[in-house]
Image: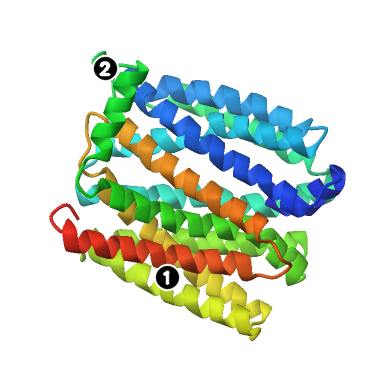
Amino acid sequence: MYLPGFPAIADGLNTDIAHVALSLTSYFIGMAIGQLAYGPIMDRYGRRRPLLAGLILYIAAAFGCALSPSIHFLIALRLFLALGGCVGFVGSRAMVRDLFSGSEIARVLSMLIMVFGIAPIVAPTIGGLVVAALGWRFIFVILAGIATLIFIAVGWFLPESKGVDASISLRPRQVGLEYLTVYREPGFLRHTLANAAATAGFFAYISGSPFVYMKLLGFTETQFGWIYGANVLGLVIAAQFNRIWLKKHSGRKVLMRANAVQAGVALILITAVYVGLIGATTMVVLIFCYLFCFGLVGPNVMALALRPFTRNAGSASALIGSIQMVAGASASALVSYLHNGTARPMTTLMGSCAVISLLLLGTIRVTHEGSA
């Protein structure tokens, strides 16, 4: 929601867009750290209570962001915003694993992507309108209000999917051993790293798109919101195609084909950008295709990573999410660091990440076919 406000935030806090983009980086770092904490807590105390606690932190941090006097405060408060908000990532995936098994995991994760996609479709458009009418600070006031509604919904309507498990220890040594057990599961690390690489490419797009679309290609804040929404709509449509294709093909087959197409699209995009033979329409279409493929890669590789876990699904979900966010933070920081006034940093990272993900998945096929 705050992406269209990047130029306004930069002007309001007397900084530049590259520094504003660091608030995305701090958010990703908070997501990585927070998920590692929530994983064992959710395995120990169930899913609902940690969800409610995280939402309270998110609401407080959102109001803090609205009152930020400088870019440094905003970057720091976005970290706390993430520490509260990341509870939803861990909880949703863990609850899917609590309630489903086998290929059903990927199909339900595809449904989650559809639900998650509704907000990003609407949010940038609303963000652009809010910035134009009320200023960027009101974006965070609205986010706090949305989180309050979610808090009420979780408290009143969300059933618990996992009871308290006193056998799960929260002592640091035992938590570390629990994560080590998850880490050692055959195929888990490669699936998780492939997922992290794919996600890093997605976050390279998120971090670089405000500059590329609004400054480089000349789209207005409102137009950027519509384009961003259309791209996320591609993710939602892909998730629904994924549910259909999984009835006829294995998650592994859908995953490999989608990742291969994504890598091919990314290489075309990089080539076109470097030779300077790409217009606004072509770039928008190619990025849409790239993100459509990501909508197929994400749920399938995550389902394969989660499949072996039952008792410690929260820890597995947290470790996947944490590695995912470290990759996202790294990609976001690199886009800012490599910023040179062109689309090359964003597109190069998008393409590199797609290729790395494909190579990692190819390794799994060779060495861990049984676990795939």
Q: What residue type is labelled 1?
A: Gln
Residue 106 visible in the current orientation:
no
Q: Which amino acid does label 2 sit on?
A: Asp
The label number, if any, that marks residue 127 in the structure image: none
At mark 2, the secondary structure is loop
Residue 49's spot in the image, x, y percent? 43, 19
Q: Which residue lies furthest to the top in this view?
A: 166
- Residue under numbered circle 1: 262
Whether tag 1 and tag 2 are in contact, CB under 8 A, the answer is no
Horizontal placement of 356 versus 311: left or right? right
Residue 172's spot in the image, x, y percent? 37, 19
**In the image, what residue occupies the spot 49% across and 30% down?**
34
Q: How crowded is mark 2: few (under 14 residues within 10 Å), some or many (20 or more)?
A: few
In depth, the one of 97 and 309 nearer the eye is: 309
What is the basis of the colouring in this image? rainbow
**In the image, what residue occupies the spot 62% across and 58% down?**
335
- Residue under numbered circle 2: 165
